[in-house]
Image: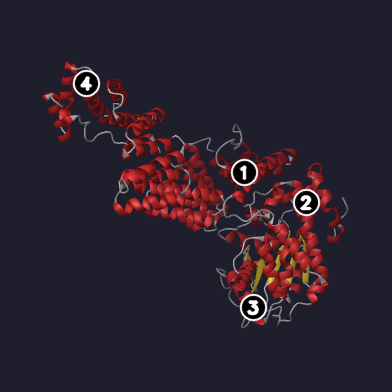
Amino acid sequence: MNRKERRAQARTGGAPGQAAAGGNDPQLAQALAAHSSGNLAAAQQGYQAVLQRQPDNSQALHNLGLLAAQAGEYPAAIELVQRALKVKPRNAAAQRDLGKILYAAGQLQPAAEALESAVKLAPRDAEALALLGACRTALGEGEAGERACRKALKLAPEHPDVVLQLANAQAWQQKFDAAIATYRKLLKQQPDHAQALHNLARCYYNQAMAQVGQGEMEPAGESLRLALEIDASFADAWSNLGSLLNQLGRPDEAEAACRRALELNPQDVDARANLALILEHASRLDDALAEAEAGLEQAPEHPWLRLAAAKVERRQGRGDAALQRFSGLEAPAEGSLPLRLDWHFEQGRLFDRQGEPDAAMAAFHAGNRLARQLAEQRFSAPGSRPRGITRQRMAALSARITPERVANWTPITAPSAEDSPVFLVGFPRSGTTLLHHVLESHPRLRVAEEVEALLSAETALVGDHKGADDYSGWLDRLESLDEEAAQAARQAYLETLTAGLPDKPQVHTGEEARTVDKLPLNILRLGEIHRLYPQAKIILALRHPCDVCLSAYMQNFDLNDAMAHFTDLEETGRFYAETMTLYRRVREVLPLDVHALRYEDLIDDFDGTVGQLLDFLELDWDERVRDFAETARKRQRIDTPSYSQVTEGLYDRARYRWERYRDHLAPVIAQVRPFLPAFGYPEV
């Protein structure tokens, strides 16, 4: 809370200090009467006249101090009330008013000391307790602030200032649900309470920022919308809603939110930076650069604006200009963790493009150190899924996929290959986004990107669960699956997979587009896929294991349990080895219909490699598959780290890139070496 808001909440006017209505001093009595009636000029003259006769009249000093505070003359007000207390140090009202004036003047520690004295003298003074609570909260002592406010609330359960200060103390401690309920309680009594409305909107906003930090994007969006329902002119909320909607894959709404923020505050460079980044992600590069440049005219060293401009210039092939955006600015040492992350990763990409692998790797190391911090924050947040659940599930599945157990699976009717989705899997960064757009360009295929549809099948059979231990319940059900349960699981899976996918027009009668489930790490769930769709065709995307691991380490992923493996090079190699070990084990036990396709072959012989893939899918060649880059450019948003690459068309700069980084990759090479010959790559 800023000083202006503190002053608004700590009004120092009101009834003057009473002492038997002036006692036997008619002049003091007249001044008190004038003060009570609102004739402040007459009251001031009266108090001054009393003090000319009686310089130590504590009541006149006290009340003259209140008048000075009302006029914003805080130093004079403090001096006058302190003089009054020298005369009568046990005057609880004067101690309380001194604390109130000090609080309004921003002198928080002296204010707290005065209010503590007031409460000791008058333990049942609800106003003093509430002010003490506000003061402790402003000092960063939210728990002490809340205790004081609760004592005040017992004495004055319906007093609006007491309820307000309690809500503020709860909000400061990030007890958002409690604070929101307390603000709502006050607003139920006084629906137009301006300060409560203002603070409630900020409480929702701060709740949203905390939710973003924990990776809870959908709840954060709802919190921001609630803030804007209360205060539609809250520019920061509009700006951050735009950034959030962009992360949620809703670019049109994101752009509209940022433009609304700029309508409210054209000088909001943060909103302009968000808008520039939204436009860059949508591949509207000229528009993005125009917004970034407009913002940089106002704030030449704004890091987000420089970052947005650098991203655009890198994609335009102007690496030198992009690197110049970082010139003269050190990577931010404090502030937004997402900014600091993106800053390092963008520098790494630029150094990589410029052929400087050592500088690039230094930047990626710095970015991944921060990514590990972010992962620790998210996995330690209340209600988050436990770290390591991916590996635990891999181990559980590996133990279940044995010839003996598979032989005991209950028999169920299998959908035909034509009635089954096609599954596009592979280790992340193996070229699945490129394949996605090649397949999407074919009129007989439509691709669902990164949809966790198998989780819906799990939920349909065993309920929603988050822990690895509950995974065994899903595997139990799969092994003993009957026709009814299988149909329920498939229906839940398909509803989630196809939700939001546009229909493609039929090529001719009866030829509807088949759905491709593109989720790389479904390679870990091929056993489950085979149980539900044993005739399904599976496309396995392969790429040189060293390139895959290097590329994964170079990405600023949205961190979940699986992606968190890529924040450490050795861990990346280990995760690759464990993933491919599980894949090969499942292949040995189950009769999967797999077509493996290497990224390098796709680059070397596009037509031949894609032709073989279409033959596997029993589809005819279609010239439109060559236009995959145009297919990508037409999409509003691509929700993978390859969004800026797939729109370029075919290029070979990433093929065998690992060789330039060989000196850095010893931890990876040791892990992936056993898989090189199996996938057709030479020994290293």
The picture quadrant where one finds residue 620 is bottom right
Can residue 322 be seen in the rendering of this structure?
A: yes
Q: Decide: is 27 above or below 125.
A: above
Answer whether labels 4 and 1 touch (C-beta < 8 Å).
Answer: no
Three-letter residue code for mark 2: Gly
Q: Secondary structure at mark 1?
A: helix
Q: Secondary structure at mark 4?
A: loop
Three-letter residue code for mark 4: Asn
- Left or right: where 562 falls relative to 274: right
Residue closer to the observer: 606 or 641:
641
Tag nearer the camera, 2 or 1: 2
Tag nearer the camera, 4 or 2: 4
> Distance between the Cα atoms at labels 4 and 1?
63 Å
Residue 218 in the image, given as x and y percentages of width and height: 52, 57
Which residue is denoted by mark 3 in the rendering? 485
Q: Earlier in the sequence, mark 2 or mark 1?
A: 1
Residue 585 in the image, given as x and y percentages of width and height: 81, 65
Number of numbered discs present? Answer: 4
Q: Earlier in the sequence, mark 4 or mark 3?
A: 4
Q: Secondary structure at mark 3?
A: helix
> Distance between the Cα atoms at labels 4 and 2?
81 Å
> Distance between the Cα atoms at labels 4 and 3?
88 Å
Residue depicted at x 44% and y 45%: 171
Q: Decide: is 362 above or below 78.
A: below
Which residue is denoted by mark 1 in the rendering? 341
Q: Mark 4: few, some, or many residues within 10 Å (few <14, many ≥20)?
A: some
> Distance between the Cα atoms at labels 1 and 3?
45 Å
- Left or right: where 17 falls relative to 587: left
> Distance between the Cα atoms at labels 3 and 2?
38 Å
Residue 313 in the image, given as x and y percentages of width and height: 60, 44
Which residue is denoted by mark 4 in the rendering? 57
